[in-house]
Image: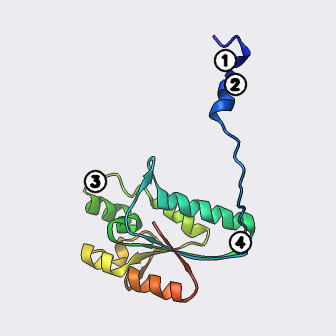
Amino acid sequence: MFTDPIHSMETIMSKTQSVLFIDIPVELQEVKSVHSIGGLEFEGDLPAALFHLQLITTDIANWKATSEVVVVFHTNAGHVTLDDAAYNSSRNIATGNPYKKLVADLIDIGVNVELCGATAKVNGWGNADLLPRIKINLDAMARTIQLVQQGFVKITE
């Protein structure tokens, strides 16, 4: 089928895989970011916000930068912080929290994961309903303002 050079597999592959050059390289020595996540958008089955957190934490590690990364889940994304039983009850399913390993991995590499206290209150969630090492803040807005005033860059997802 691919007998002539114009239609060879190599030619087809080269047309589908473009070379990527980074025109604006970035390397930071310090990262202070607060990620406000009020809803989930997906890239395939992976919440984009969690993918983006993996991306920036990988960059931070590659740069050997100092960092403080805080993630505040609130509103329609608060359920990401729930343990299996609370997740099942909240989402009316029996599969458990599909994000728990991704969240645990982020915490393991130093990301501070928080749940908005107002979101927890309106949903009837308490500290015992959360995944390990999740902290509850007063509310997402006050916490984000606090961190921005401390020099954190706000990322909204």
Colouring used for the render: rainbow
- Tell which tag, 1 or 4, sits nearer the viewer: 1
User: Do tag 1 and tag 2 residues touch (Cβ < 8 Å)?
Assistant: yes
Task: Give me the C-alpha separation between circle 1 and circle 4.
Answer: 44 Å
- At label 1, counting other C-alpha atoms closer than 10 Å, the crowd grade (few under 14, some 14-19, many 20 or more) is few
The type of residue carrying mark 3 is: Ile
* For residue 40, above or below residue 154: above
The type of residue carrying mark 2 is: Thr
Q: Which residue is mark 1?
A: 7
- Tell which tag, 4 or 3, sits nearer the viewer: 4
The type of residue carrying mark 4 is: Leu
Task: Give me the C-alpha separation between circle 1 and circle 3.
Answer: 50 Å
- Tell which tag, 1 or 3, sits nearer the viewer: 1
The image position of residue 76, as x and y in percent, is: 33, 66
Quadrant that contains the C terminus: bottom left
Q: Is residue 123 left or right of residue 105?
A: left
The circle on residue 93 is 3
Task: Give me the C-alpha separation between circle 4 and circle 2.
Answer: 38 Å
Q: Which residue is mark 2?
A: 11
The circle on residue 28 is 4
The type of residue carrying mark 1 is: His
The image position of residue 58, as x and y in percent, is: 65, 61
The image position of residue 154, as x and y in percent, is: 51, 76
Quadrant that contains the N terminus: top right
Q: Earlier in the sequence, mark 4 or mark 3?
A: 4
